[in-house]
Image (spheres, rainbow, N blue to C red):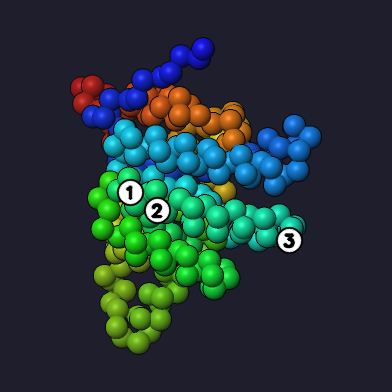
């Protein structure tokens, strides 16, 4: 029987973990299964990791559910992903509510179908008073698009005389992003052995720590999650500064 990894010490937990859930399609292809099967398996992993994050008292978790570039995939795969997303939101929000998990969505809602937009809004409203884990699902999200939209809005306001450009600091800019109100991720995890952000939280992850895992997302376990958190706990974060020992 496999040994169960103990949960990390709560004092060492990051405030916010963001995950690029990569490798569903390759996981399925290796098993001579359709890509859709990989996405189904991936949803099961989502449930496992959200439950683990809530169990250990992690304050914030963001999952990259569907990128703005994913619309370029074959229409059959996109349709299947939309169906899975609908099913997850419908089936899981009640349980998340029972476990005091607040759900939030970031991304461009103009391209999604009306029923999906309605599901997202309903889920946010139902869980708004929850005080446990803050779960953010990045759906139809692209960081470059997010940054450009914020800049465009501020440019419009400045052109109308409603915003003094001198007031645009890094903190002010961050307040105009879709993640406003959520702390920047301390740790970004990416599965499947890829070493890139893929247009995910580019502004917000400026000083994040990164852990890259070779396993595809469907194979990512609670123990793998805890191991990534332990790796983070061993990192020394300097945010551009130096340690007192280095100065001495």
The reply to whether discs 1 and 2 touch (Cβ–Cβ < 8 Å) is: yes
Distance CA(mark 1)–CA(mark 2) = 6 Å
Per the image, label 2 sits on a secondary structure element best described as helix
Closer to viewer: mark 3 or mark 1:
1
Q: Nearer the viewer, residue 182 or 61?
A: 61
Q: Earlier in the sequence, mark 3 or mark 2?
A: 3
In terms of image quadrants, where is residue 79? bottom right
Q: Nearer the viewer, residue 108 or 147?
A: 108
Image spot of residue 205 (x, y percent): 41, 46
Q: Nearer the viewer, residue 174 or 87?
A: 87
Residue that label 1 marks = 98
> Residue at 58% of width from left, 36% of height from top?
217
> Residue at 48% of width from left, 41% of height from top?
47
Residue that label 3 marks = 75
The reply to whether discs 3 and 1 touch (Cβ–Cβ < 8 Å) is: no
Q: Quadrant of the C terminus?
A: top left
Q: Earlier in the sequence, mark 3 or mark 1?
A: 3
In terms of image quadrants, where is residue 86? bottom right
Residue 171: image tag: none
> Residue at 33% of width from left, 25% of height from top?
8
Q: Nearer the viewer, residue 89 or 191?
A: 89
Distance CA(mark 3)–CA(mark 2) = 30 Å
> Residue at 37% of width from left, 37% of height from top?
53
Closer to viewer: mark 3 or mark 2:
2
The reply to whether discs 3 and 2 touch (Cβ–Cβ < 8 Å) is: no
Residue 218 in sight from this viewpoint: yes
Distance CA(mark 3)–CA(mark 1) = 35 Å
Image spot of residue 25 (x, y percent): 69, 42
Residue located farthest toward the right when viewing the structure as drawn? 32
Image spot of residue 9 (x, y percent): 28, 25
Residue that label 2 marks = 94
Residue located farthest toward the bottom when viewing the structure as drawn? 160
């Amino acid at each position: 029987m496999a040994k169960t990894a103990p949960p990390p010490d709560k004092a060492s937990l990051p405030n916010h973990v963001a995950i690029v859930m990569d490798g569903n399609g390759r996981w399925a292809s290796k098993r001579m299964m359709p890509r859709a099967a990989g996405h189904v398996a991936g949803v099961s992993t989502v449930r496992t990791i959200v439950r683990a994050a809530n169990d250990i008292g992690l304050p914030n978790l963001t999952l990259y559910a569907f990128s703005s570039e994913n619309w370029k995939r074959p229409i059959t795969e996109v349709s299947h992903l939309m169906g899975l997303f609908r099913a997850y939101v419908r089936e899981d929000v009640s349980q998340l509510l029972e476990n005091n998990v607040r759900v939030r969505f970031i991304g461009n809602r103009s391209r999604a179908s009306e029923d999906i937009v309605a599901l997202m809004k309903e889920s946010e409203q139902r869980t708004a008073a929850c005080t446990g884990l803050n779960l953010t699902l990045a759906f139809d999200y692209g960081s470059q698009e997010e940054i450009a939209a914020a800049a465009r809005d501020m440019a419009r306001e400045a052109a109308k005389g409603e915003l003094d450009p001198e007031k645009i600091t890094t903190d002010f800019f961050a307040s105009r992003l879709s993640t406003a109100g959520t702390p920047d991720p301390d740790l970004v995890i990416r599965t499947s052995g890829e070493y890139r952000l893929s247009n995910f939280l580019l502004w917000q992850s400026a000083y994040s720590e990164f852990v890259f895992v070779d396993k595809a997302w469907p194979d990512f376990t609670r123990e793998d999650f805890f191991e990534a958190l332990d790796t983070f706990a061993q990192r020394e974060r300097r945010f551009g500064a130096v340690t007192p020992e280095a100065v001495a």
